[in-house]
Image (spheres, rainbow, N blue to C red):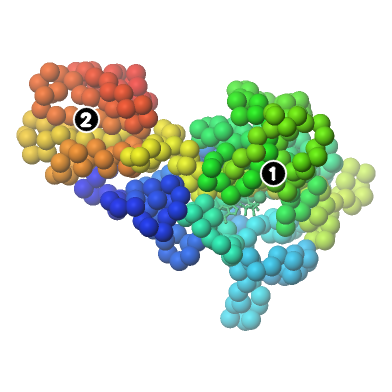
Amino acid sequence: MRLSRAFIPTLKENPVDAKIVSHRLMLRAGLIRQHAAGIYNWLPIGTEVLKNISSIVREEQDSTGAQEIIMPTVQSAELWKESGRYNDYGPEMLRIQDRQDRDMLYGPTHEEVVTDIFRNNIRSYKDLPINLYQIHWKFRDEIRPRFGVMRGREFLMKDAYSFDLTYDDACHSYNKMFISYLRIFKRLGLKAIPMIADSGPIGGSLSHEFIVMAATGESKVYCDRELLSKEIEPHIDYDSNLQDAVDDWTKYYAVTEDKYSSEDSNIKSKDIISANGIEVGHIFHFGHKYSKPLNASIKGTNGKDIFPFMGSYGIGVSRLVAAIIEANNDEKGIIWPEIVAPYKIGLISLKVGDLEVDNLVESLYQKINSKGYSVLYDDREERAGVKFSDMDLIGIPWQIIIGPKGIKEGYLELKSRKTNQLFQVRLDNIEQSLLQYVSP
Ligand code: ATP
Ligand code: MG
């Protein structure tokens, strides 16, 4: 993409009402613009980052055997009356009426809808286990939307729902999501720690939140220091028994504030840190909480009707954009991990208008584009300083810098946004040389 054609409205000044760094940088680098309180437009590079995060979530969820669907954002209130949650959910639910005066709502979560799909289409134990997920917009009329997309009212969530025949099978489904979540956050370059959590309005008996430690986080958590340096196993077979792998994480003390008691006797206080964190995911097991009231029974192995055990599993996809920025920034701007960056390479010409430089940069742009690299080419007639600071603000991980001097000597400069290191890359075998540092 040529920067002269790209819609990336950057801001020079810090927006005054943005209180945390991710919110400031998302506005300044042109990822988002507010539409109304807690409701945002996602501009091109913000959209690109959301797509990149969604692809990783999708790949990892698919590899557990979960299947992607799309459910409606606008739901019928009838289902919520059946489950008993219509009155319980409170003012966070946006309630609307259609032209026939039917009660509708904008979905804050989808347990009822997915259970309705299940009961209308699945009849037998032979169809279990099944896990259906979507990546879609939710609306919660939060009392205090703030910090940009960190706590929005409309936000993008990955929500998965599992149905199992037995309690043990349901634990296996829960464990699959537990491990899948660790893998997703790791791939996104985040250290997210699973912590025992309250299940809130979703309900249920077993629940973990995945927390990224950050001073600006709104969740207060307590956990064993050792968890901060714990790594995940690189390989996983989702058909094997995952209990040991999960226990290996849950054997440490790690709880959210709701579950914390200073009298927890089996812990030594010196090993427990208390900190703030960002909740990026939350998984629940809740048994028959929805399958029973919605009468989603199926034929069991002995021909008798049974209710499936259910769980639900959320990831805050749009909140993750902010969480990633909170963990990866400096005074110049965002430092995207390569895997989510809107563009992997920024191409900066130091002398627009110089025929030799223009020709070379143009042909290089075509060449690396055709090799599948995503490139943001700054073709504007701006000072070099402006170009550097825009690339740094937007956070492009690799920046190619070309000027007359380098051309004469047969090389270009490649800068790492993260380490600031400069590498000299030969011009004669550019693709091979680039590959040493960055793959498409
Ligand atoms: P919170 O405690 O932050 O209000 P929650 O516990 O109500 O979140 P869940 O129902 O567990 O949220 O939703 C699943 C995930 O969706 C959360 O882990 C979080 O990452 C994300 N999420 C929830 N509410 C918001 C919001 N208002 N804005 C952005 N993301 C959100
Ligand atoms: Mg939660």
* Amino acid type, callout 1: Thr
The residue closer to the viewer here, 22 or 93, is 22
298 vs 72: above or below: above
Q: Under tag 2, what secondary structure?
A: strand
402 vs 94: above or below: above
Residue at (50%, 61%) from the top-left corner? 38
Q: CA distance from mark 1 to mark 2?
A: 47 Å
Res. 33 mark:
none
Residue 381, position as x, y percentages in the image: 13, 44
The number of numbered badges drawn on the structure is 2
**Which image quarter holds the N terminus?**
top left
Reading the chain from its start, which is encountered first: label 1 or label 2?
A: 1
Res. 401 mark:
2
Residue 53, position as x, y percentages in the image: 49, 41
* Amino acid type, callout 2: Ile
Residue 51 visible in image: no
261 vs 415: above or below: below
Q: Quadrant for residue 289, please give it.
A: bottom right
Q: Quadrant for residue 80, please give it.
A: bottom right
Residue at (11%, 31%) from the top-left corner? 357
Q: Quadrant for residue 331, please give it.
A: top left
Residue 392, position as x, y percentages in the image: 31, 38
Of marks 1 and 2, the one in the foreground: 1
Residue 328 visible in image: yes
Please report contact status of discs 1 and 2: CB closer than 8 Å, yes or no: no
Residue hosting label 1: 256
- Using residue 104 as the reference point, say whether residue 321 is left or right of it: left
Residue at (69%, 28%) from the top-left corner? 271
Q: Under tag 1, what secondary structure?
A: strand
